[in-house]
Image (spheres, rainbow, N blue to C red):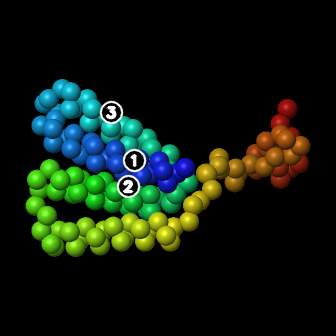
Amino acid sequence: MAWVYLILAGLLEVGWTFGLKESKGFTVLVPSVITIVLIIISFMLLARVMRYIEIGTAYAIFTGIGTVGTVILGIALGDSADPLKLMFLGILVIGIVGLKLVSGDKAEDKTDNSDSTTRDGISLSASEAASGKERA
């Protein structure tokens, strides 16, 4: 599910990138509000994804999807589509796919319990565990 959220976050980045343009520097109300909402949702999804996918991979794919999507949508809306732009876009897509292929999912981060231990279901500090005393 993390990969689905990551793709969605990247696609939302495309939306808020165009929203930035349409908001004209946040001077037009409706596009500004839509852009801010898309940014918030996009980053919330990205933050959630980073619990399961390595940060470097997650961020690179997030920005890559946003970049590729923005360029493609820009071309569809009239931006130039010269051969070099398309070649470099293809290289970017290869990089994104490559990162996905070589990255492993990580287990969800758990609370750091390196300075405590449990005995009979009771959490102990490191000093309590060493001395054999339990909290009341």
Whether pointer 1 and pointer 3 mark residues with C-beta atoms closer than 8 Å, the reply is: no
- In the picture provided, is 116 more to the left or to the right than 104? right
Task: Kindly identify the residue that appears in the image at 14 percent across and 50 percent down.
Answer: 77
Distance between mark 2 and mark 1 Cα atoms: 7 Å
The type of residue carrying mark 3 is Val
* On-image quarter of the C terminus: top right
**Three-letter code, disc 2:** Phe
What residue is at 21 percent from the left and 57 percent from the top? 71
- Read off the residue under disc 1: 9
Q: Residue at x 38, y 55 (%)?
A: 62
Check whether the beta carbons of the residues at disc 3 and disc 2 lie within 8 A of each other. no
Q: Are marks 2 and 1 in contact (CB under 8 Å)?
A: yes
Q: Is residue 36 left or right of residue 7?
A: left
Q: Is residue 127 shown to the viewer in this render?
A: no
Q: Residue furthest front?
A: 76
Q: Which residue is mark 2?
A: 62
* Secondary structure of the residue carrying numbered label 2: helix
Q: Which residue is mark 3?
A: 37
Please give left or right for residue 38 compared with residue 81 in the image. right
91 horizontally vs 124: left or right: left
Q: How many marks?
A: 3
Where's residue 8, x and y in %?
41, 47
Element class at badge 3: helix
